[in-house]
Image: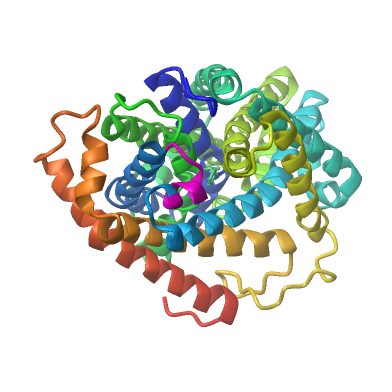
């Protein structure tokens, strides 16, 4: 075992990487995107993107990591393409940005556990006051970041993998319990219809664009998180099948999150599904109202369970986000993991302070050059950072990683790495498809997404 650490088994890796993928993106982002995108039609497009576009990029990232056994910057150096290590640096930069605001939202969710336990469903109407109480939510965020740092400080198998082995199965059980329960509520069926019966007239180009962005973010791609995790994978493990399991788990849990939330909205709206398109407030505003409607011990139990599971999902993702800069400073600057974990976490927490307070003092941090999807203007700092990191840098990073692997490092080298642990890979249909996807399909789609985002979010030019 190398000094950097390793996952102890293929299952350990799959759970950790699925833990990275499954996060706020699945349980918070996915349902609200479905709600805004008009239901099942969005779901179908999302699924297609996950498998035909994201899966090949995931395989590529893991392969680059395992081949080099290095962090995202060191990986390009180790392959002999030092000039290309800017991609890794871009990833490091976006990872730090994502964690800085992601942790703020995780902190909100963490605080909600206590609100639910106390039966304070009225928090729904006070959400604005809650998030502008920066000392309170800041403290929750600090605790969340500290837990993240603790897990990462314990190392790859002793921290990251151990946490994932505990949290992922528990998360799935909790979701299944809630899904089972919400199905018994009146009008649950209307939620299911909205969620599962597609209405293709709702499928506009911007819904397709959103589905693509959602899929990419949800699978933790484009910033080297999976290069990093891939660097701890054993040479005899099968990357092709591991990546398939990771994708399936991520998609499966997003799907279950929908099965949890839309029946609740069906119940609350008396079947009209009004409120499904509420956007980001769906989880923090609408859900507590619904738990309040359920009322009593059952309302408290469901509400608490929900926010605990949301935090579990978020934690395995914040861990992976922190691991990217940690692997970098451990490999390249030779700083001890424990010390690095605490220092970098503190640094990122500080970077996140504008996102923390940018919600309350939005005029102060006004970033009027970002435009919302509905044409309004983004005025809070958190949304600005999210637009920059998630919607802009991730597709760009993914595009360059795919292009690099296919045309610079070359496909035969990628194939060589992938066939370790996957004897039937060479000559298979999967190999042919991956070569096509990595070489042409993914770079073209991703660069288009990048261009559309820049024009739209930063210049207000809406092409689709
Ligand atoms: N995939 C995570 C989510 O869905 C977020 C994430 C993005 C984690 C990029 C790591 C890297 O919440």
Give the image's coloring scheme.
rainbow
Q: Is residue 353 above or below residue 28?
A: below
Q: In which quarter of the image is residue 444?
A: bottom left
* Position in image of residue 380 (x %, y %): 74, 64
Residue 334 in sight from this viewpoint: yes
- Residue at horizontal 80 percent and vertical 28 percent from the top: 114
Q: Is the magenta stretch mostly helix, strand or loop?
A: helix
- Residue at horizontal 38 percent and vertical 63 percent from the top: 446
Magenta-colored stretch includes residue 23: no
Q: In this view, does 334 lie above or below 374?
A: above
Q: Left or right: where does residue 214 sit relative to residue 367?
A: left
Please give the range of residues in magenta.
Answer: 69-77
Q: In this view, does 86 lie above or below 290?
A: below
* Position in image of residue 215 (x %, y %): 42, 50
Q: In which quarter of the image is residue 425?
A: top left
Residue sitting at the far left: 427
- Residue at horizontal 50 percent and vertical 61 percent from the top: 86
Q: Left or right: where does residue 433 sit relative to residue 361?
A: left
Residue 108 in sight from this viewpoint: no
Q: Left or right: where does residue 377 sit relative to residue 408?
A: right
* Position in image of residue 313 (x %, y %): 58, 32
């Amino acid at each position: 075992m190398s000094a950097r650490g390793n996952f102890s088994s293929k299952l350990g890796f799959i759970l950790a990487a699925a833990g990275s993928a499954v996060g706020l993106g699945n349980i918070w982002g996915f349902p609200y995107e479905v709600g805004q995108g008009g239901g099942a039609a969005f779901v179908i497009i999302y699924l297609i993107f996950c498998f035909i576009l994201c899966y090949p990029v995931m395989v590529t990232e893991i392969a680059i990591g395992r081949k080099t056994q290095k962090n995202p910057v060191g990986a390009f150096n180790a392959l002999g393409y030092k000039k290309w290590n800017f991609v890794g640096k871009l990833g490091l930069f976006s990872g730090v940005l994502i964690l800085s605001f992601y942790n703020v939202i995780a902190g909100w969710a963490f605080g909600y556990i206590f609100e639910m336990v106390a039966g304070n469903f009225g928090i729904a109407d006070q959400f604005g006051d809650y998030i502008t109480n920066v000392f309170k939510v800041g403290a929750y965020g600090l605790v969340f970041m500290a837990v993240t740092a603790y897990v990462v400080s314990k190392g790859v198998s002793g921290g990251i993998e151990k946490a994932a082995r505990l949290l992922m199965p528990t998360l799935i059980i909790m979701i299944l319990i809630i899904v089972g329960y919400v199905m018994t509520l009146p009008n649950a069926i209307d939620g299911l219809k909205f969620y599962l019966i597609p209405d293709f007239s709702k499928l506009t180009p911007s819904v397709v664009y959103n589905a693509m962005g959602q899929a990419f973010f949800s699978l933790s791609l484009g910033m080297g998180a999976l290069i990093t995790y891939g660097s701890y994978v054993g040479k005899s493990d099968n990357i092709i099948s591991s990546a398939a399991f990771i994708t399936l788990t991520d998609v499966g849990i997003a799907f279950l999150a929908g099965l949890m939330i839309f029946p609740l909205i069906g119940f609350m709206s008396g079947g009209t599904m009004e409120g499904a398109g509420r956007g980001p407030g769906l989880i923090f505003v609408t859900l507590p109202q619904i738990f309040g409607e359920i009322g009593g011990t059952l309302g408290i139990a469901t509400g608490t369970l929900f926010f605990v599971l949301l935090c579990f999902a978020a934690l395995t993702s914040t861990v992976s986000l922190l691991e990217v800069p940690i692997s970098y400073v451990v490999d390249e600057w030779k700083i001890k993991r424990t010390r690095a974990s605490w220092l970098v976490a503190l640094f990122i927490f500080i970077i996140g302070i504008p996102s923390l307070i940018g919600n309350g003092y939005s005029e102060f941090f006004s970033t009027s050059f970002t435009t919302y999807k509905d044409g309004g203007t983004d005025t809070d700092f958190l949304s600005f950072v999210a637009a920059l990191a998630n919607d802009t840098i991730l597709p760009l990073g993914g595009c360059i990683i795919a292009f690099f692997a296919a045309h610079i490092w070359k496909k035969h080298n990628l194939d060589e790495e992938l066939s370790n642990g996957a004897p039937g890979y060479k000559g298979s249909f999967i190999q042919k498809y991956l070569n096509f996807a990595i070489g042409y399909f993914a770079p073209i789609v991703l660069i288009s997404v990048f261009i559309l985002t820049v024009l739209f979010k930063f210049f207000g030019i809406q092409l689709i």
